Image (cartoon, rainbow, N blue to C red):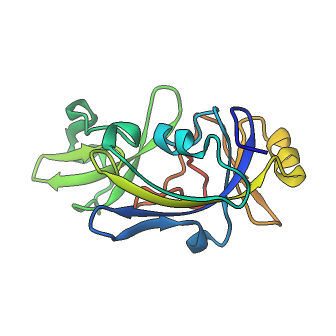
Amino acid sequence: MTVKDGDKVRVEYEGKFADGTVFDASKEHGRPLVFEVGAQHVVPGFEKAVLGMKEGEEKEFTLKAEEAYGEPNEQMIQKVPKDKVPPETKEGMVLGVGLPTGQQIPARVTKVDDNEVTLDMNHPLAGKELTFKIKVVGINLEEDLKEMEAHEGGCCDTDGEKGECCSAEDEGEDEEGGCGGNCNCG
């Protein structure tokens, strides 16, 4: 059986920058990444790389920025009045910024001056080339199918006891921009 659109796959992965630094790995979360192929839960290049793989197969591939998190967008960098952010805000912090839809996205504080704060809402991995080493450890496993069905948007991570699920609109990245335990799969 090879992976095709619509399959629910379980993948062990390690993501590295061009210099070899690991930015995220499934072993750090104690479980593989689980996602539905074609549902846009992971970046496009990752999803494309999994297509056609068989259970037990391993692969290493490198994604250019446009196949991963895209290039940084200057419109995603905004200045806001300092009185609109918590008083303890410092450069390097990550704040949750509410969108009109009610969704929250992470914003990195890049500058704080006397009157305003500069927020960068680009994904932390935007503009970066990423190398992944992956292994498909399951395709359409019964437990993954049941978990995803129970959570309409799809289940991204499961640890055998508790599924951490999200809909396609949810963002659950950790501060480094990896999948994190909240299943932001893309």
Say which residue appears at 85% left-offset and 42% top-offset.
150
Q: Position of residue 140 (x, y in %)?
A: 82, 46
Quadrant position of residue 13: bottom right
Say which residue appears at 82% left-offset and 51% top-offset.
144
- Would residue 35 appear left or right of 41 to someone viewing this image? right
Quadrant position of residue 180: bottom right
47 up-or-down from 23: above or below: above
* Quarter containing the N terminus: top right
Q: Residue furthest left?
A: 114
Q: Is residue 138 visible?
A: yes
Q: Residue furthest top?
A: 100
- Would residue 176 appear left or right of 120 to someone viewing this image? right
Looking at the image, which is closer to me, 59 or 166? Answer: 59
14 up-or-down from 151: above or below: below
Q: Position of residue 131 (x, y in %)?
A: 40, 57
Q: Is residue 121 visible?
A: no
- Would residue 22 appear left or right of 144 to someone viewing this image? left
Say which residue appears at 75% left-offset and 66% top-offset.
159
Q: How many marks?
A: 0
73 up-or-down from 185: above or below: above
Q: Position of residue 6 (x, y in %)?
A: 73, 33
